[in-house]
Image (cartoon, rainbow, N blue to C red):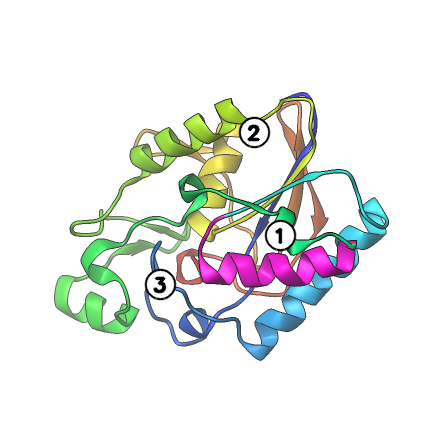
């Protein structure tokens, strides 16, 4: 891309707060703290862009990303119905783990998270793994207008893989994955480099996926 891409994680949800697996299909609402995080994102982006910026708006079709985007769009003076939804921006499919408590899964199966990296260390049963996430994001990137700036609200792991495709990162099971960032963080990415426009107040790591 020649134009900048602004990439954000959604804000905190009830599943995040309850240490419960969300994955790509669970439509979980934001907590009170998450709503405050979304407003902080909107304030920061309004200060960065000004009113009614001429940028493309994209989001995962998950409820938590759309709720976050609705708050942000209002701050920007943009119509929520301008948001383009794309399944390729969804979070990792956690398969049989979806909706379950992290603690219960770990008690049954043993460790599932690399805590140094904040990433799953084993594939979710009947779920998705990092090369598949990178493949779908690669097709999404290829379809973008490279001359149009865009704001994207996605998920913890998906955003880290997308940043890895754009700016590089550590190799994780054959895929470049960028570093951790708290929920509500917004990155500006252009020409293979990124900077944080806003650092969120949420947690970092896989439990905030």
Q: CA distance from mark 1 to mark 3?
A: 22 Å
Q: Name the residue located 53 percent from the left edge and 64 percent from the top edge.
A: 203
Magenta: main secondary structure equals helix
Secondary structure of the residue carrying numbered label 1? helix
Q: Name the residue located 51 percent from the left edge and 28 percent from the top edge.
A: 141
Judge from the rendering whether residue 87 lies leftward or rightward of residue 59; answer left or right.
Answer: left
Tell me the mark number nearer the camera, choosing from 3 and 2: 3
Check disc 2 and report the residue beneath it: 167
Q: CA distance from mark 1 to mark 2?
A: 30 Å
- Considering depth in this image, is 61 or 175 the residue closer to the camera? 61
Secondary structure of the residue carrying numbered label 2? helix
Check disc 1 and report the residue beneath it: 81
Give residue 172's quadrant in the image: top left
> Which comes sooner in the sequence, label 1 or label 2?
1
Q: Callout 2 environment at 10 Å: few (<14), some (14 to 19), or many (20+)?
A: some
Magenta-highlighted residues: 60-76
- Considering depth in this image, is 198 or 72 the residue closer to the camera? 72
Asked if 13 appears above or below 45 in the picture, the reply is below
> Which comes sooner in the sequence, label 3 or label 2?
3
Q: Farthest residue to the front: give it.
A: 81
Q: Name the residue located 53 percent from the left edge and 67 percent from the top edge.
A: 12
Give residue 205's quadrant in the image: bottom left
């Amino acid at each position: 891309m020649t134009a900048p891409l602004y990439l954000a994680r959604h804000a905190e949800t009830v599943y995040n707060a309850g240490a419960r697996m969300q994955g790509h299909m669970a439509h979980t609402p934001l907590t009170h703290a998450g709503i405050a995080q979304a407003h902080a994102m909107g304030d920061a982006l309004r200060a960065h862009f000004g009113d009614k910026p001429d940028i493309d708006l994209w989001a995962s079709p998950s409820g938590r990303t759309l709720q976050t985007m609705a708050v942000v769009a209002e701050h920007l003076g943009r119509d929520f119905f301008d948001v383009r939804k794309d399944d390729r921006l969804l979070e990792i499919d956690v398969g049989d783990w979806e909706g379950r408590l992290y603690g219960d899964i770990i008690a049954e199966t043993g460790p599932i998270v690399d805590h140094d990296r904040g990433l799953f260390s084993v594939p979710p049963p009947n779920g998705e793994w990092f090369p598949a996430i990178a493949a779908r994001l690669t097709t999404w990137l290829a379809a973008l207008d490279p001359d149009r700036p865009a704001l994207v609200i996605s998920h913890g792991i998906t955003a880290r893989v997308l940043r890895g495709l754009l700016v590089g990162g550590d190799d994780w099971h054959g895929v470049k994955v960028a570093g951790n960032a708290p929920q509500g963080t917004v990155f500006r990415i252009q020409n293979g480099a990124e900077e944080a426009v806003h650092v969120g107040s949420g947690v970092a790591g896989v439990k905030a996926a």
